[in-house]
Amino acid sequence: MDNVQIFDTTLRDGEQSPGFSMNREEKLQLARQIEQLGVDIIEAGFPIASPGDLDATRAVAAEIKHCRVAALARARQEDVEAALRGLEPADKPRLHVFLATSDLHLKYKLRTTREQALEQIAKMVRYGRQNCDEVEFSAEDASRTDIDYLCQVVLAAVESGATIINLPDTVGYSTPDDYGEMFRKVRARLGAHPNVVLSAHCHDDLGLALPNSLAAIDAGVRQIECTINGIGERAGNASLEELAVVLHVRQDRYQVTTNIKLEMLYPTSRMLSKITNVSVPPNKAVVGANAFAHEAGIHQDGILKNPLTYEIIVPEKVGVPARRLVLGKHSGRNAYRSRLAELGYETTDVELAECYRLAIALADAGKEITDRDLVSIIHKVRRQPATANAR
Ligand code: KIV
Ligand code: ZN
């Protein structure tokens, strides 16, 4: 089975989004955790952006030794020099050079021509390659770039020394079919360069970042750029934890592996939330508070009999401490009996029936039943005379 390289850009694209900025120490703390998580490449920052970003990139590059450290630069001399300075302390550096390639960006944002952009790309990739062992080139807005021109860009970058070509869906506009097709066409034009690694980088503006990343894998892409909790510009990037879990749970379908240690996913997600003070929506796949919580009585009963009835992966596998059966008015007696037993109270059928009646009354009043409620209910039931319990 092929291995898909995971390129984490939480510290760069993720940090770029409002509310997620991190200081040097916070970036370092998260970088250590992301390294433990098993990613292959950490993008540490965009050093031209600020002296603080340069400093944080250098700090990450000096400390992170198991995975490769990347730094971003526009295809401009001063950017590339700043990124190279950021990467100086790295054992395994990767210079990440990008330039927009769609006509829209060339004409309105960069006010340049296709020909000039091609020259600039070739020149900066060549310069980067003379100063760094590994260069990745990204064609910003690739998914809205004329495909023939995109192929010319890719060939120019490869012939100038780039060995990884990233084709981002910068504005989250692509659909899985379109995105996969773009990679197939580019791969076909790269016939003479079979070792070039193609990479996907998807934004979630239409909620398609994950499906687009998966379509890219189907089309032969072997590096995916993503972030913890899916943070990133606007609606964010593809979420690392969702990607890693899909590739694990549906390995039968995608036939690829990753180096991610799944049990580190939840702690890493929590660490990011804690550092940035931004919580994860409760219904978020894999790491949301409700991702493994079951409230409906029928579901709880099924889970207690065999977790496979309603769970496609055990919570512990992704580092979630323990399955949470939310006790409420939809919960069945079996769920109440089980939680009481976990709390140390083995109940008779009569006691359980009374506990259940009191708990449902409380839940009907709009309350979620906590462990503390249950303990006070069972004590109350046990204080009642036996005849009352036998009702
Ligand atoms: O979304 C994008 O195009 C990017 C590139 C700079 C890689 O973040
Ligand atoms: Zn991006």
Image: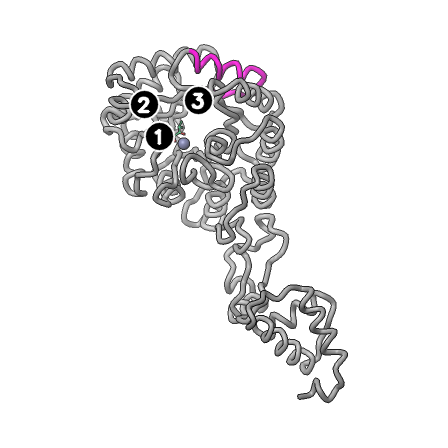
- Residue 129 at x, y percent in the picture: 43, 14
Residue 18 lies, with reference to residue 291, above or below; the image says above
Disc 1 target residue? 167
Q: Are marks 1 and 2 in contact (CB under 8 Å)?
A: yes
Disc 3 target residue? 96
Location of residue 340 (image quadrant): bottom right
Instruction: Specify the segment rendered in magenta.
Output: 78-96
**Residue 52 or 40: which is nearer the viewer?**
52
Please indicate whether residue 218 sits to the left or right of residue 4 in the image.
left
Count residues near mark 2 (Cα–Cα under 10 Å), then give few for <14, some for 14-19, many for 20+: many
The tag earlier along the polypeptide, 1 or 2, is: 2
Q: Look at 32% across and 30% down and name the residue there.
A: 141
Amino acid found under the numbered disc labelled 1: Leu
Mark 3 sits near ligand 1, with its Cβ under 8 Å away:
yes
Amino acid found under the numbered disc labelled 3: His
**Residue 294 or 181: which is nearer the viewer?**
294
- Residue 79 at x, y percent in the picture: 44, 15
Callout 2: SS: helix
Disc 2 target residue? 154
